[in-house]
Image: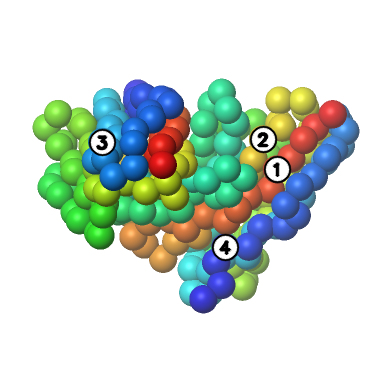
Amino acid sequence: KAGVTQTPRYLIKTRGQQVTLSCSPISGHRSVSWYQQTPGQGLQFLFEYFSETQRNKGNFPGRFSGRQFSNSRSEMNVSTLELGDSALYLCASSRGGGYTFGSGTRLTVV
Amino acid sequence: QKEVEQDPGPLSVPEGAIVSLNCTYSNSAFQYFMWYRQYSRKGPELLMYTYSSGNKEDGRFTAQVDKSSKYISLFIRDSQPSDSATYLCAMSEDSGGGADGLTFGKGTHLIIQP
């Protein structure tokens, strides 16, 4: 079966711009979570959506936002990009019993 | 404080050796424990998922959880060069991730020498 699909794989953006990342979960998985991975901080939780509702949110500024659609696909948006937002952004889906991650979107802010 | 400690390595062992990877944590509310493997430029891949204390075996992998000591381990038997990767432990208060999602260790970089 198809895994978690994230698009695009790579992005280069300029400071101050905004960006939207997309995630298609495994079919039947209604929970979608987003994580930021950097060499210094490791994986950090951004937020989780379940049935189109944000269920939990990590300790990130309001510039980071997301949404989930009725087909469980999810998007995350980062506005007013900063150099420190450069990271691998990972999406994970679950039906209970552990999360399956996508390959991530590598965002570089210049 | 929901901190998870994990030795970053690198840990280098010869092919065929038994590998032991460990994490310690401080939050006694953690109930669900996971091990992920991450290859370069890939997302983490779930290897083991356990609930509460005890052992779980899957092929060459064995996960152990000791909640009284707040200590979890992953053992890899008959290690192969293809096992070379970064291994991440993760944990949560409930099966749905909980209010803070999964809390990850920083990962241990493992190198299996042919």
In-image side of B28 versus B86 (left or right): left
Q: Position of residue B87 (x, y in %)?
A: 41, 40
Residue in front for this viewpoint, B35 or A81: B35
Instruction: Tell me the SS state at disc 4.
Output: loop
Residue in front for this viewpoint, B3 or B47: B47
- The subunit carrying tag 4 is A
Q: Position of residue B48 (x, y in %)?
A: 31, 53
Q: Residue at x 41, y 66 (%)?
A: A95
Crowd band around label 2 with a 10 angstrom C-alpha radius: few (<14), some (14–19), many (20+)? many
Q: CA distance from mark 4 to mark 3?
A: 29 Å
Q: Give a yes or no on whether discs 4 and 2 share a subunit.
A: yes
Q: Quadrant of residue B7?
A: top left
Please tell me the numbered disc located at residue A106: 1
Q: CA distance from mark 1 to mark 2?
A: 6 Å
Q: Amino acid at mark 1?
A: Arg
Please tell me the numbered disc located at residue B20: 3
Q: Amino acid at mark 4?
A: Val
Instruction: Tell me the SS state at disc 2.
Output: strand
Between discs 4 and 2, the one toward the N terminus: 4
Q: CA distance from mark 3 to mark 2?
A: 29 Å
Q: CA distance from mark 1 to mark 4?
A: 15 Å
In-image side of A109 versus B12 (left or right): right
Q: Quadrant of residue B24?
A: top left
- The subunit carrying tag 1 is A
Instruction: Tell me the SS state at disc 3.
Output: strand
